[in-house]
Image: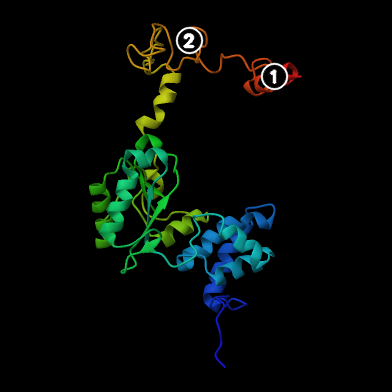
Amino acid sequence: MTEVSLGIPEMPAPDYPADVRARLESDAREVIARYPGSRSALLPLLHLVQSEEGHVTRTGIRFCAELLDLTTAEVTAVATFYTMYRRKPSGDYQVGVCTNTLCAVMGGDAIFEELQRHLGVGNDETTADGKVTLEHIECNAACDFAPVVMVNWEFFDNQTPESAKALVDDLIAGREVRPTRGAPLCTYKETARILAGFTDEREGAVEAGGSAGPASLAGLRLHRGEAPARTVPQQANPPSAFGEGAPGAEAGTHATPTSPSPAEHPSSHDAPLPTSDSDPARADHGTERTTEEDGE
């Protein structure tokens, strides 16, 4: 009789080889000791096991569960919630292109499409040489440098399709690549160990840091009075959206005939809150009641 596979993984998961288990367990005990409750160490421990194989395996999940007295289901729920934990083998360099709103309109979508064509891979796929995994990612809080590409969670700001292609070509060729801010890149496994809370032992890496750029600090400088304020004065008679000569295009009207004038409400924060009489929903109900009464 032919067996039918249902795609359910074999249980229990295999353990690490004895020497690997001993090394990881020593590191894990160091991480767990930093927390008042062992369960709080789960996130860094997932990074630790990811640093061993490049992704979170069933064996890694079993290891975390045993060390923290959790079920494998509890560990899996966390590992599948956060996108920084890989669930399948990936490349030495995780190349993420931000395709969230601002990066997308500034060119992120074009960069992602060009890299797919250039590398011959789709989203969340790895090149045949195992060097680069490409994926689109959500906002990485660098909108003032859009469009942004990240490699192993390091920033590459103000990218173009051409600069992004040169970047992945350098990664594949093994040439040194330096992020816009911070230290030179390391592999995804090395990054995972650093995220687990262990010291980056590369010479000069910690000193390199990676502070915010001028665009990020513009608001702070303005607050401190270090930069002149640039304000856009409110127009007393803004151009009408209806066009010259059209209804509602009279001088002093707003873009829509029902909008308040700038003089009345200079900002939405100054506008009065709706009352029961001015609430459109309540007004409609009142009209309906009046009509019914008139009909009677």
Q: Are marks 1 and 2 in contact (CB under 8 Å)?
A: no
- When the figure is inspected, residue 63 is found, relative to residue 100, above or below; the finding is below
Name the spot of residue 247 as percent of width and height, x first.
40, 13
**Can residue 84 be seen from the camera position used here?**
yes
The amino acid type found where label 1 is placed reads Thr
The percent coordinates of residue 219 (x first, y second) are 43, 24
203 or 278, which is in the foreground? Answer: 278
Residue at the front extreme, as displayed: 296
Task: Judge by depth and name the residue closer to the eye, 169 or 257.
Answer: 257
> In x, y percent, where is residue 123?
39, 58
Crowding near the residue tagged with mark 2, few <14, some 14–19, many ≥20 C-alpha atoms within 10 Å = some
For this rendering, which residue is in front, 243 or 127?
Answer: 243
Label 2 is placed on what type of residue? Ser
Q: Quarter of the image containing the N terminus?
A: bottom right
**Disc 2 designates what residue?**
261
Circle 1 crowding by C-alpha within 10 Å: few under 14, some 14–19, many from 20: few
| Residue 212 visible, this orientation | no
Q: Dot 1 lies on which element? A: helix
Q: Would you say 165 lies left or right of 104 here? A: left
Q: Alpha carbon of mark 1 to alpha carbon of mark 2: how far? A: 32 Å
Question: Is 174 drawn above or below residue 113 in the view shown?
Answer: below
Q: For mark 1, what is the residue?
A: 291
Residue at 51% from the left image edge and 12% from the top image edge: 260
Q: Circle 2 sits in a helix, a strand or a loop, which is it? A: loop
